Image (cartoon, rainbow, N blue to C red):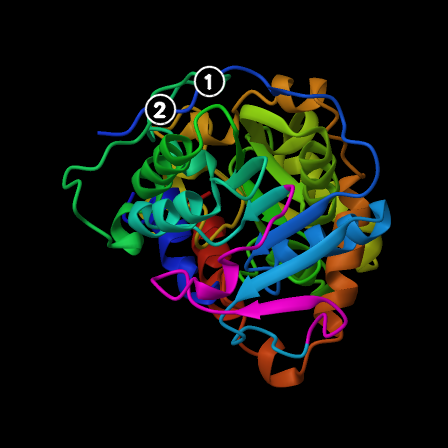
Amino acid sequence: MAMTRRDFLQASLATLAACASPKAGGPGGSSRADGPSRILILGGTGFLGPALVEAARARGDVVTLFNRGKTNPGRFTDLEQLLGDRDGKLEALAGRKWDVVIDTSGYVPRIVRMSAELLAPSVERYLFVSSISAYDEAIPPGSDEGAKIAQLSDPSTEDVRANYGALKAACERAAEAAMPGRVLVVRPGLIVGPGDPTDRFTYWPVRLAEGGEVLAPGTGDDPIQVVDVRDLGNWMVDMAGRRATGIVNAVGPASRTSMRAMLEACQPGAGPAAPLTWVPWPFLEKEKVEPWGDMPVWIPAGGAESGMSQVSIARAVAAGLRFRPLGETARDTLSWWNGLPPERRAKPRAGLSREREKQVLAAWKVSG
């Protein structure tokens, strides 16, 4: 395929603003600390960050944000916000103490190493937000946290667009080297829900709400995995409170879910049922309709990257990760989308244009 799932993930970063490997064991660490935790979030005002802030507030934790003050600068004005830059301007963190740091903005190992080494004497735990893209693309379906990791062909590169997953894996090692045995690595899959700047999941409830014949990819049975940002945020804050360590895949739903089931879950909140026309992958490939980019969330079963939509989440579920119904996520995402300015809604960042969709559907009907 011309654009792989990883290619599209790396491209979408534009919308988001010899180390020892971490142990691949399940969540460990001490039992939950008594009373509120003092949490430092590196980032905090983008997509995942606000979900973490709201979850921490609900627990009664005390939250400090460290960022450049450029993304949503008016958000969380009631919280302590320290200004600086991950790449060398860390003075605001010096001499301070927190129970846990949650790193939502680490993409380059050199930069992660700087913050982790500086904070090592000052925090109990370092929670690093990685990605299932840290795995080799060809992992088999059902792979757990011990699966093969992506490797950098050039260890000196800091090109995040070209090496997103391998750099995330190197960042994991950098954090663990700075704070041995005190790091929790969370590897989310596709994070979705209200506020998502990538429009990857959003494409589907929006498209269904528009009505008319909808191009649906594959057979409908291809497995998908997503996690609502609010569920992920609640669980991560809970794990921070437990002072957990180890490596955990964090995606959902709890049981195997197909593309068909996901679209059916999206439909009720979108209005009258839109007719779905399922078009098989060989035809879409011929028409240069790409999985993940043109058809968000979807990866054809049996393809080279199909394992990336079927990773094991047994460890996360055992550690308490819970999932709201996909229909609720879709409904809330659509509501959020409808509240955006018209100029933003006019330029979705994922999925086929309506004109292109009609062209492919017409070609499919002629071929049949």
Give the image location of residue 310, x and y in percent: 52, 25
- Of 315 and 294, which appears nearest the observer? 315
Residue 341 sits in quarter: bottom right
Give the image location of residue 65, x and y in percent: 61, 61
Q: Is residue 76 on the magenta stretch?
A: yes
Disc 1 residue type (three-letter): Ala
> Marks 2 and 1: CB-CB under 8 Å?
yes
- Decide: is 184 above or below 345: above
The residue at which mark 2 appears reads as 21
**Would you place residue 279 above or below residue 93 in this image?**
above
Q: Distance between the residues labelled 2 and 1?
A: 8 Å
- Whether residue 257 is situated above or below residue 164 in the rendered picture: above
Q: Give the label on residue 24, or none.
A: 1
- Asked whether 22 or 305 is in front, the reply is 22
Q: Residue at the location (75% across, 75% down)? A: 339
Q: Find out whether residue 117 is within the magenta segment.
A: no
Along the line of sight, the residue nearer the viewer: 169 or 20? 20
Residue 342 percent across, percent down from the top left: 65, 83
* Residue 213 visible (yes or no): no
**Which residues are the magenta region?**
75-99
